Image (spheres, coloured by chain):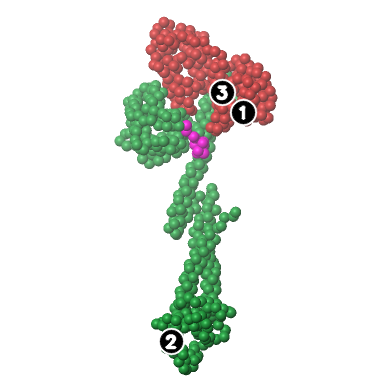
Amino acid sequence: MRRLSLSSRLALLFAACTAVVSLVAGVLFSRASEAHFVELDQQLLDGKLMALRRALPDLQSSGSEVRLADELSRQADVSLRITGNDGQRWFDSSTRLPDRLPQTPGLSTISHDGTDYRVLNAPLSVDRPGSPQLTLLLDITHHQHFLQRMQRLIWLTVGLSALATALLGAWAARSGLRPLRRMSAVARGVSAQSLNARLPAEDMPPELAEMAHHFNAMLGRLDDSFQRLSAFSADIAHELRTPLSNLLTHTQVTLTRPRPLEDYREALHSNLEELQWMAQLVNDMLYLAKADHGLLAPRRESLELAEEADVLLEFFAPLAEDARVTVSRHGSARIDGDRSMLRRALSNLLDNALRFTPAGGEIRVRITDQAKGLTLTVENSGAGIDAAMLPRLFDRFYRADPARQEGSSEHAGLGLAITESIVRAHGGRIHCESEQGWTRFVITLPRMD
Amino acid sequence: MKLLIVEDQAKTGHYLRQGLAEAGFNTELVADGSTGQQLALSGDYALLILDVMLPGRDGWQILQAVRSAGLDTPVLFLTARDAVEDRVHGLELGADDYLVKPFAFSELLARVRSLLRRGSAQPQETSLQLADLRLDLIRRRVERNGQRIDLTAKEFSLLEMLLRRQGEVLPKSLIASQVWDMNFDSDTNVIEVAIRRLRLKIDDEFPNKLIHTVRGMGYVLEERPA
């Protein structure tokens, strides 16, 4: 089944609401006017009854027929039947009166021969038992016609107002939903080349302003990622250009003339080094690409972070001893995570710290267990990092040391980016701070339950 | 002992065969999956090296056919893709090891040797020896020329690995994985430093050096004529 559009849905709802409201109002009004007519008729018949009773104190007295006729002639739509207490019909003011009339005392309504009557039964004299029974009939056909006309009018009003509100509602809904259409127009216009399009959130109604805000934020994030990605592709080409150019030049130069065997061997070794660097770069980039595609799915095994840190410190111990750097670990915490991935993340941080700690310096790994999660800090003494560089440290190919030339070092500048990807894949965050001769990488990991 | 290489890329296949042949293995190379499967099912091979993407039948299909025929020939997969599912899929089907391109030949060679060794029963050794270097596995002691040498636990493990696989070029990644359980690509020079420190204790005082660097490939423990 095809879904109704939001506008049609709103229009139909409006129409239904109006129909219900006008129907209720119409029914109430028609009831009230009917009751009002009954009341009027009662008053009229009561008055007539009193006049009749006055006019006919005694049916036997002479001249009563004349008075009766006189009394009845004053109101053409009132008829009278007088019945004796033995049930015998004494008098009918009109020949068209129905034979059978309700005998119940008080007011009732009957229909006969296309004519509607209001009927009032009362004894001629209240005091005397066995008094003849008066039955007053009031022709109310025109009232009933009026009521029927009004009911038709009510139905017509219900129908027309429903239709009108449906149309008005459709128009109102359409104009009310205009901001949504504007959103969809912006969304339609978004492509890789125009990620800078934004919705005017301040022009939006409050209900949509938040959505517009989120929409803009999403576009912002996309734009940012896309910029990074484009920069990344450009960086890759740039990073690969130097080793490729080395390989080309070296190989061609080697081949230009015959050389001693040792020279060939040397050329191949040199090429091998460039190639290994490139292979490492490609593998790291594939790892990051996998992370970008959310394919870095960490296994969840229960790990004691202190043990993992100790294993890594032991791994790096020869390097640290050579560099005359003291390493230590403080604190412990358990976490559910991927051993190999977390080791890789921590290894990159330690490797980084070792490269920037001067001889005689210190590297500390701190693990703090907290209710919400845990923090893992790797801090090293040293010159520190310029605050302006801190946010860019995790960018791919970013090197804090400008003296490092691409391709010339064994580090491609992807280590911290990989660490960040691993931390993110575990639902955590990483940031770097640098103050008073200490550089500190802080990883916060949420507790997984 | 014959190895079967099923690899459709001519250059890769050629270099693999040349490299393995020069390392002393008798190898056969085919370029399409169907022929590869026929040969693999003959059961004449000690090890299969399969590319995943192949014309005819892919590496996984060959592996499945081999396993359902009841053969337990070790299988090493080569692939250009490193999706987690691929790895899991391959290992579920009964692959023994997995190498993602680009890989170093020294890495492949080391893994091939590991797989071939896995099949044959290892005698339970109590000591390992090369020239005048002796490693006592029970008392965890190392002597060279009768002279006791003190090693740290990790240095001992490193030397044990070198001795067990003497004559083989061991890539740094394999050493990191086997000795320190670091199973990831790392561009750190920890292994170089660790080897240098081991050399200082094992080789420096002695005229015939046992630990050798194979430039760009790894390290080897062997006795070389002076």
Spatial separation of the CA atoms under disc 3 and disc 1: 12 Å
Q: Which residue is mark 2?
A: A53
Residue A246: tell me if it is visible: no
Chain under disc 2: A
Q: Nearer the viewer, mark 2 or mark 3?
A: 2
Residue at the spot of label 1: B60
Residue A297 in picture, x, y percent from top left: 49, 34
Relative to A214, residue B104 above or below: above
Mark 1 or mark 3, which is nearer the start of the sequence? 1
> For the residue labelled by badge 1, is the local secondary structure a helix, a strand or a loop?
helix
Could you tell me which chain the residue with mark 3 belongs to? B
Say which amino acid is labelled 2.
Arg
* Badge 2 element: helix
To which chain does the residue with label 1 belong? Answer: B
The region drawn magenta spans A288-299
Residue A389 placement (x, y as % from top left): 39, 39
- Residue A295: say if magenta: yes
Residue A255 in view of the camera? yes
